[in-house]
Image (tube, rainbow, N blue to C red):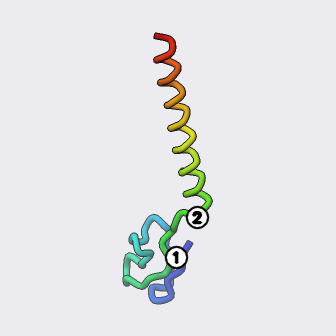
Amino acid sequence: MPWCETCAKFHPPGELSDEGACPDCGTVIAAPAKAPWHFKLLVAALVIYLGWRAFQGVAWVIHQL
């Protein structure tokens, strides 16, 4: 939980603004969360894999007709 020195209290991450600012005084107390590079790589690989499997499925259906 991020601690605000100005307000002298903890704030749960859900209370903070999108920029990581304290809801009471507006002081930035936490950096916004960013997705790590390996998560982006995993999503890209998943999109490529599912695209390939969709292509194979369409080709199989066409071959069956």
- Report the amino acid beneath label 2: Pro
Task: Identify the residue shown where x is 40% and y is 70%.
Answer: 18
> In the depicted view, which residue is nearer to us: 47 or 6?
47
Mark linked to residue 21:
none
> In the depicted view, which residue is nearer to us: 65 or 41?
65
Above or below, 27 against 38 in this view is: below
Residue 7 on image: x %, y %: 45, 85
Q: Residues within 10 Å of mark 1 (few under 14, many from 20)?
A: few
Q: Residues within 10 Å of mark 2 (few under 14, many from 20)?
A: few
Residue 37 on image: x %, y %: 59, 63
Residue 40 on image: x %, y %: 55, 57
Above or below, 7 against 15 in this view is: below
As drawn, the residue found furthest toward the right would be 38
As drawn, the residue found furthest toward the top would be 65
- Looking at the rendered image, the quarter that the N terminus falls into is bottom right
Left or right: 36 as drawn, with respect to 18: right
Say which residue label 1 marks: 10
As drawn, the residue found furthest toward the front would be 63
Task: Identify the residue shown where x is 42% and y is 78%.
Answer: 22
SS at badge 2 = loop
Dot in front, 2 or 1:
2
Say which residue label 2 marks: 36
**How far separated are the C-alphas under marks 2 and 1?**
26 Å
Q: Quadrant of residue 41?
A: bottom right
> In the depicted view, which residue is nearer to us: 51 or 42?
51
SS at badge 1 = strand
Above or below, 41 against 12 in this view is: above
Task: Identify the residue shown where x is 58% and y is 48%.
Answer: 45
Above or below, 43 against 23 in this view is: above
Total number of numbered labels?
A: 2
